Image (spheres, helix red, strand yellow):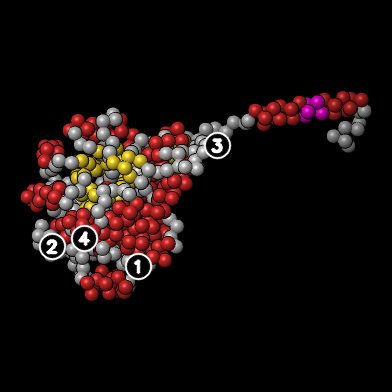
Amino acid sequence: MTRRAQDCYSIADLRALAKRRLPRAVFDFYEGGAEDEITLASNARAFDRWQLAPHVLVDVSKASTACTLLGAPAAMPAAIAPTGAAGFGWRGADLALARAAASMGIPYTLSSSATTAIETIADKAPGRLWFQAYVLRNQDFFWKLIERAEQAHYEALVITVDLPVGGKRERDFRNHFSIPFRFTARNVLDFASRPAWALDMLVHGMPVMENLRGLEAAATNATKIASSVGRSYDPAFDWARLAAVRDRWPRKLIVKGVSRGDDARRLAAMGVDAIVVSNHGGRQLDGAVPGLLALREVIEGVAGRVPVLMDGGVRRGTDIAKALALGAQGVLLGRATLFGAVAAGDAGARRALEILHDELLRTMRLCGARTVAQLSADLLRPADEMPARRPSQYAQAAHEAAGSIIAAASQSVREAALSHPGTHAENP
């Protein structure tokens, strides 16, 4: 698998490798979005609305992606986003992602719904660790999760606020995929089509969400719970409850899932330490504004008081460069790194970060930017508003000269015709 991962040269290659080794239900759970998946597609297409206008003749021999991210050094302006149930694709995928992030020198965000425990990640993958806490109906359980993250010395707490209920993820319904997992005739045949994956699950058992052990009993109807994310989450969570989290959590607080300037302004006034512009990767509200297009409004809302990051649709180093040029301090990497981890474990997670880092550095050099701070809006041009083509001064002069020559020639022809009547028909 290490060799196969090294043979991947893009995130798309890692995605294809993951698709080949995973049952359709598992792969679709990672890749799929809500309803018609309009927002899922729009997240990626939003980057195509901007093109790069590079500076040239700049010494970029010592260009570097190193930066400061949320007040601490990072090797590149990125963090790994929380991705739940990664262990269903590759046993130990959460740990693989955390180790890859630590080796690259960027933060890793552990999801509440990870298949590896808070303490295990802290012990086996020490680095810059953030913990993403979903807001649960069971408030005692919620506060216990936050206490565990504090005791394990996680540097930041991420509260996801775009999940009052779970999105309608129709791929999961059709594939009979649910968490907690239940076997049906349809998904058993699907799993059998990937014998290597199935053998691992048979020998070692299906992974469980370690941090949510004891939260609730397994559901009894797989169809009803197929789109199961959000079943235990609290739709009553509001500004007052978030303020209570701010009061009790002593370190950096990041709020993820914001797309409006007025909400961002209120969060900045509350004293959060960073905001992530996000629509949950298109997995919640279908038709939501793409993260890249919501970025400007949120940045204007905070008015420089707190850093703003974004996620959604990042698949290339050029995507990271465009997000930074539009004002983001950094990006969160979700499916891009997840595809690597579920395709080839540690080797795949590392390869995903290597690809993105190489592409970002290459983009910087090609744009004449020595540092990430030099990735500014000056480098961007809207792709859908291309300027009208205008002839250069040399082309215009040539056109005018050609017109003069043609006019002079026409005059000569007319004069010759008058001097030699009757010949113009044969010699026009």
**Callout 3, which amino acid?**
Leu
| Label placed on residue 193 | none
**Of marks 3 and 1, the one in the foreground:** 3
Residue at horizontal 32%, vertical 66%?
Answer: 22
Is the residue 199 above or below the residue 115 in the image? below
Q: Position of residue 237 (x, y in %)?
A: 13, 43
- Figure check: 6 above or below 192: above
Cα separation between marks 1 and 4: 19 Å
Q: In terms of sequence position, does the residue under pointer 1 or pointer 4 come before the other?
A: 1
Of badges 3 and 4, nearer the viewer stands 3
Circles 4 and 2 in contact, beta carbons < 8 Å: no
Q: Is residue 407 highlighted in magenta?
A: yes
* Mark sitting on residue 219: 2
Labels 3 and 1 touching (C-beta < 8 A): no
Which segment did they paint magenta? 405-410
- In percent of the image, x 91 and y 31: which residue is there? 422
Is residue 383 among the parts visible in the rendering?
Answer: no
Q: CA distance from mark 3 to mark 2?
A: 63 Å
Q: Which residue is mark 4?
A: 115
> Which residue shows up at 36% across the image and 62% down it?
347
Residue, disc 3: 57
Q: Nearer the viewer, mark 3 or mark 2?
A: 3
The three-letter amino acid code for the residue at tag 1 is: Arg
Q: Which residue is mark 1?
A: 21
Seen in the image, is 105 located left or right of residue 163?
right
Residue extending farthest to the left is 140
